[in-house]
Image: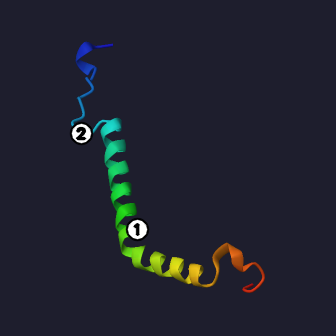
Amino acid sequence: MNMSMRRRRAARPGMSGRRLLKAQGALAGGLLAAVLVKEFPGIVRELRIYRMTGGLRARRRYP
């Protein structure tokens, strides 16, 4: 085999797997935080309704 026919693998400039995984984790965490902040008023409202109806103590009053 002729040595001039061999190709060298070029170093691929870009992100390593670990950096890419960290970036994806940061993106997913940011998205989760944004959804929580957006939905927080609704969650608080649902908790207030739950407490007004008796919570766990309301046994058979509300199906």
Q: Amino acid at mark 2?
A: Gly
Height in image: 5 above or below 44? above
Residue 23, given in percent of the width and then of the height, sits at 31, 47
Depth check, front residue: 16 or 44: 44
Which residue sits at x=63%, y=84%?
A: 53
Q: Please report whichever mark, 2 or 1, sits nearer to the chain's N-terminal start.
A: 2
Label drawn at residue 14? 2
Which residue sits at x=33%, y=51%?
A: 26
Q: Residues within 10 Å of mark 2 (few under 14, many from 20)?
A: few
Q: CA distance from mark 2 to mark 1?
A: 32 Å
Label drawn at residue 13? none
Q: How many numbered marks does the figure carry? A: 2
Report whether 38 appears left or right of 62.
left
Depth check, front residue: 49 or 57: 57
Residue 13, given in percent of the width and then of the height, sits at 21, 36
Report whether 33 appears left or right of 43.
left
Q: Amino acid at mark 1?
A: Leu
Q: Secondary structure at mark 2?
A: loop
Residue 51: which quarter of the image? bottom right
Which residue sits at x=37%, y=43%?
A: 21
Report whether 51 appears left or right of 40.
right
Q: Secondary structure at mark 1?
A: helix
| Residue located beneath label 1 in the image | 36
Height in image: 8 above or below 1? below
Height in image: 4 above or below 52? above
Residue occupying the far right of the picture: 60
**Quadrant of the image for the N terminus?**
top left
